[in-house]
Image (cartoon, rainbow, N blue to C red):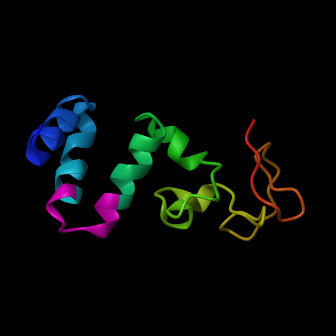
Amino acid sequence: MKHQDRIDEHRKNMPRQFRKVYDVAMSGRSLRAAVNSQCIECVGYVFKEVRLCCSPQCPLFLYRPLRGVSYGVSGVGQSGAESTDSRQADSGKGVHCG
């Protein structure tokens, strides 16, 4: 299978609402679109799950969309408030899911 055929097949299998950002990402015109597209794909195309991402080991973790309301590796939300969420980090050692 050729490169473009793989891209076309991948695009065809994703939910329609995410195809536009994927197209922009694959055109090479936007790093932001590439990050957004990768994050939404990683969480199974469930937009709410991007916000709840608990994979601080991911190189894109600090750049993911909607990060302002979730918790980073330090356990402190982007607003500076301590996390009270169940995904809160223990002693700055990383974020724990579930």
Instruction: Write the start and end of the magenta stretch as one range.
Output: 26-34
The vertical placement of 59 against 18, above or below, is: below
Q: Which residue lies furthest to the right in this view?
A: 91
Q: From the image, which quarter does the C terminus lie in?
A: top right
The residue at the point 56 percent across, 58 percent down is 58
Q: Is residue 4 left or right of residue 42?
A: left
Is 22 inside the magenta-drawn segment? no
Q: Is residue 1 left or right of residue 61?
A: left
Residue 33's x, y, as percent?
Answer: 29, 60
Residue 32 highlighted magenta (yes or no) = yes
- Residue at screen point 17% across, 51% down: 23
Direction from residue 55 to residue 16 in the image, left or right = left
Residue 78 position within the rendered picture, expressed as x and y whole percent measured from the top left: 65, 67
Q: Position of residue 6 (x, y in %)?
A: 17, 39
Is 8 located above or below residue 59 in the figure? above
Q: In this view, does 12 lie to the left or right of 82?
A: left
Residue 39 or 83: which is nearer the viewer? 39
Question: Where 85 falls versus 80 (above or below)?
Answer: above
Image coords of residue 56 (percent x, y): 64, 58
How many numbered marks, from 0 up?
0
Identify the residue shown where x is 73% and y is 41%. 97
Q: Quadrant of the image for the N terminus?
A: top left
Q: In which quarter of the image is residue 72?
A: bottom right
Q: Main secondary structure of the magenta part?
A: helix
